[in-house]
């Protein structure tokens, strides 16, 4: 349960949020360069796998810390409240969905999902180029959806800061 007596997220939640935000944005930016530089594929996959593995730990930590989460700055039940919950939920979904679809895309192209050459994630599906191309399109579409969600997320936080004088950045940093 969120708590109206608390005005900051727990340190562990803040650390996971910042680390995964940086990693997801780095994975995205490297993903955008892949068409011109295929040599970046190993780095792209490794950063994305880090998002997936840290995402699992983040979710476990978020559940563990659920009684220490500050109450929403939006009025419970208002439209803004539900938009906030939907955007946060969908951001969590992209945190898992993008790496998993990327992993499946790699397998379908006939390659392993390798983490900096240290280990490979298990191969989930066999080589199938038609399927790989479809999964690749889904992965690219998912990345575009992520950009849209991130824009709404950051703009929402800025609106709270500038128009409502609620410094939500301070709650998360
Ligand atoms: C530079 C980029 C980002 C900025 C500036 C930012 C900013 C913030 C801020 C200020 C909050 C606190 C809202 C509040 O006070 O309730 C927050 C919460 C949150 N952010 Fe971000 N964020 C960024 C990137 C991301 C990314 C990439 C994700 C993807 C998973 C994400 C997911 C969340 C979630 C789920 C919450 C709610 C807290 C929780 O339940 O863990 N954010 N963000
Ligand atoms: C936060 C996680 C991730 C983000 C934001 C992301 C983003 C992207 C983007 C923007 C592209 C270029 C899409 C295009 O040009 O249409 C891409 C391509 C690709 N990504 Fe990811 N990615 C992530 C994770 C992963 C992971 C974990 C893997 C594999 C282990 C992966 C494998 C691939 C592959 C194979 C392609 C090329 C697809 C194709 O040629 O059709 N990605 N990714």
Image (cartoon, rainbow, N blue to C red):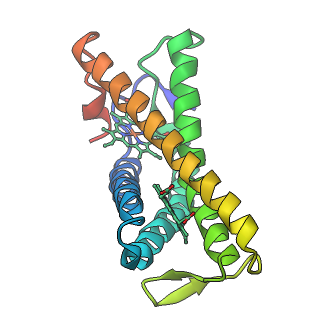
Q: Quadrant of the N terminus?
A: top right
**163 relative position to 64: left or right:** left
Identify the residue at horizontal 38%, vertical 23% (top origin). 156
Vertical relation: 107 (above or below) 95: below
Q: How many marks?
A: 0
Identify the residue at horizontal 53%, vertical 40% (top origin). 145
The residue most toward the bottom is 118
Residue toward you, 59 or 28: 28
Identify the residue at horizontal 69%, vertical 58% (top origin). 134
Residue toward you, 171 or 143: 143
How far from the left and from the top, in percent, is residue 122?
68, 82
Q: Quadrant of ligand 1?
A: top left
Q: Quadrant of the C terminus?
A: top left
Residue toward you, 163 or 48: 48
Would you identify the image quadrant in which residue 78 lies?
Answer: top right
Residue toward you, 153 or 6: 153
Vertical relation: 168 (above or below) 93: above
How far from the left and from the top, in percent, is residue 158?
28, 23
How far from the left and from the top, in percent, is residue 32?
39, 57
Identify the residue at horizontal 66%, vertical 63% (top origin). 133
**81 relative position to 39: left or right:** right
Vertical relation: 107 (above or below) 5: below
Would you identify the image quadrant in which residue 6 lies?
Answer: top left
How far from the left and from the top, in percent, is residue 61?
52, 55
Vertical relation: 120 (above or below) 128: below
């Amino acid at each position: 349960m969120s708590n109206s007596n608390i005005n900051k997220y727990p340190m562990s939640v803040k650390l996971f949020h910042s680390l995964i935000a940086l990693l997801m944005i780095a994975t995205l930016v490297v993903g955008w360069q892949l068409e011109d530089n295929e040599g970046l594929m190993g780095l792209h996959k490794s950063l994305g796998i880090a998002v997936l593995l840290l995402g699992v730990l983040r979710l476990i930590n978020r559940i563990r810390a659920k009684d220490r989460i500050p109450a929403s700055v939006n009025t419970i039940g208002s439209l803004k409240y539900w938009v906030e919950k939907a955007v946060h939920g969908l951001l969590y979904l992209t945190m898992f969905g993008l790496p998993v679809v990327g992993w499946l895309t790699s397998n379908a192209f006939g390659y392993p999902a390798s983490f900096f050459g240290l280990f490979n994630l298990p191969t989930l599906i066999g080589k199938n180029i038609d399927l790989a191309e479809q999964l690749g399109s889904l992965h690219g579409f998912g990345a575009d959806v992520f950009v849209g969600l991130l824009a709404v997320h950051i703009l929402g936080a800025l609106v709270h800061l500038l128009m409502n004088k609620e410094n939500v950045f301070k709650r998360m940093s």
